[in-house]
Image (tube, rainbow, N blue to C red):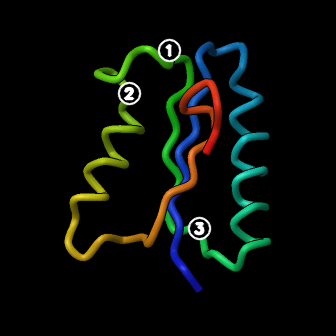
Amino acid sequence: MARAAIYLRVSTDEQAHSAGAQEEGARAWCAAHGHDVVACYRDVGISGADFVNRAGLLDLQLGARTKPCPWDFGRCQGCCRRSV
């Protein structure tokens, strides 16, 4: 089973409820594909244009630099206009 990290972002605090829906969707996708979610990073109320002040994204990048990496791949939800 591959280990996965999830990254979620919503641009306004009013959209905070959608962060939960994004996480549910990402976890469901991971489960359907046989992946174990080992980390979840969030940025709520942060613009997608702001790459400097995203604590969740910075934590994800820090984790990716850890040796050995704590996950095998990442699943992004809401990190840009189109999720990957």
What residue is pinned by disc 3?
Answer: 37
Q: Which mark is residue 54?
A: 2
**In this rendering, position of residue 33 left or right of residue 68:** right
Q: Residues within 10 Å of mark 1 (few under 14, many from 20)?
A: some
Residue under the point 53% across and 53% down: 40
What residue is pinned by disc 1?
Answer: 47
CA distance for labels 3 and 1: 25 Å
Give the image location of residue 30, x and y in percent: 69, 66
Amino acid type, label 2: Arg
Quadrant housing residue 76: top right
Give the image location of residue 60, x and y in percent: 37, 49
Q: Is residue 51 above or below residue 49?
A: below
Mark toward the start of the polypeptide (2 vs 3): 3
**In this rendering, position of residue 72 left or right of residue 27:** left
Residue under the point 20% across and 72% down: 67
- For mark 3, give the secondary structure: strand
Quadrant housing residue 66: bottom left
- For mark 2, give the secondary structure: loop
